[in-house]
Image (cartoon, rainbow, N blue to C red):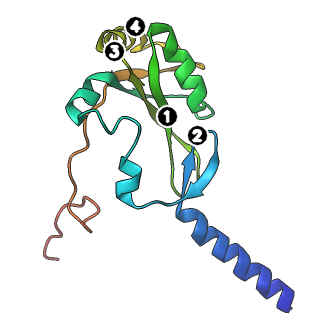
């Protein structure tokens, strides 16, 4: 009975711990990092405004697509600096969208024009220039204020 209880506690702890893990393309899971460390990347020397001109949002991706496959699909338009698929924090599964960053604006524009509404892996993808997320209030989970009920 003690072994069963110990196994149940281990499974519960593993479930909680995995909720704080972040999928990393090609390296399995890595421990959660402070938000400042997550924001730092090899492109941190480039201003966010310049990055927006080089970064594409790609939506409607096949669920099984990997970041390397995304990079290969867009590399025909020019040098791809970075390509990543966004994963769900809790399940670790793809959320069906990702981002591709090019080294030159002309390459990003060509890819955006030619890949928008193209078919990848049997799915029609939407490609647009990435936009910065709107800032959210701390602790609000981006919800509308509660009404008096």
Q: Where is residue 59, by image quadrant? A: top left
Q: Residue 35 versus residue 20: which sits nearer the camera?
A: 35
Q: Residues within 10 Å of mark 3 (few under 14, many from 20)?
A: some
Q: Which residue is mark 3?
A: 104
Q: Which residue is mark 2?
A: 25
Q: Is residue 73 left or right of residue 7?
A: left
Residue 48, x across and y down, in percent: 24, 35
Decide which of tag 3 and tag 1 comes sooner along the chain: 1
Q: Nearer the viewer, mark 4 or mark 3?
A: 3
Q: CA distance from mark 4 to mark 2?
A: 26 Å
Q: Nearer the viewer, mark 3 or mark 2?
A: 3
Query: Mark number for residue 114?
Result: 4
Name the element at disc 1: strand
Tally the marks. 4
Q: Which residue lies at the image location 74% right of the left edge and 80% below the top edge?
A: 8
Q: Which residue is mark 1?
A: 84
User: Vertical placement of 8 versus 62: above or below?
Assistant: below
Q: Residues within 10 Å of mark 2 (few under 14, many from 20)?
A: some
Q: Nearer the viewer, mark 1 or mark 4?
A: 1
Q: Residue 3 versus residue 106: which sits nearer the camera?
A: 106
User: Vertical placement of 17 versus 22: above or below?
Assistant: below
């Amino acid at each position: 009975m003690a072994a069963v209880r110990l196994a149940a506690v281990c499974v519960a702890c593993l479930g909680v711990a995995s909720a704080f893990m972040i999928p990393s393309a090609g390296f399995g899971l890595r421990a959660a990092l402070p938000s400042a460390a997550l924001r730092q990347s090899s492109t941190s020397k480039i201003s966010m405004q310049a990055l927006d001109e080089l970064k594409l949002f790609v939506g409607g991706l096949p669920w099984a697509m990997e970041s390397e496959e995304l990079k290969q699909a867009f590399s025909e338009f020019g040098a791809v600096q970075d390509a990543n698929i966004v994963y769900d924090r809790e399940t670790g599964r793809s959320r069906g969208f990702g981002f591709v960053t090019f080294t030159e604006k002309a390459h990003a524009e060509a890819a955006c024009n030619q890949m928008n509404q193209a078919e990848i892996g049997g799915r029609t993808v939407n490609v647009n220039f990435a936009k910065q997320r709107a800032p959210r209030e701390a602790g609000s989970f981006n919800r509308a204020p509660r009404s008096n009920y």
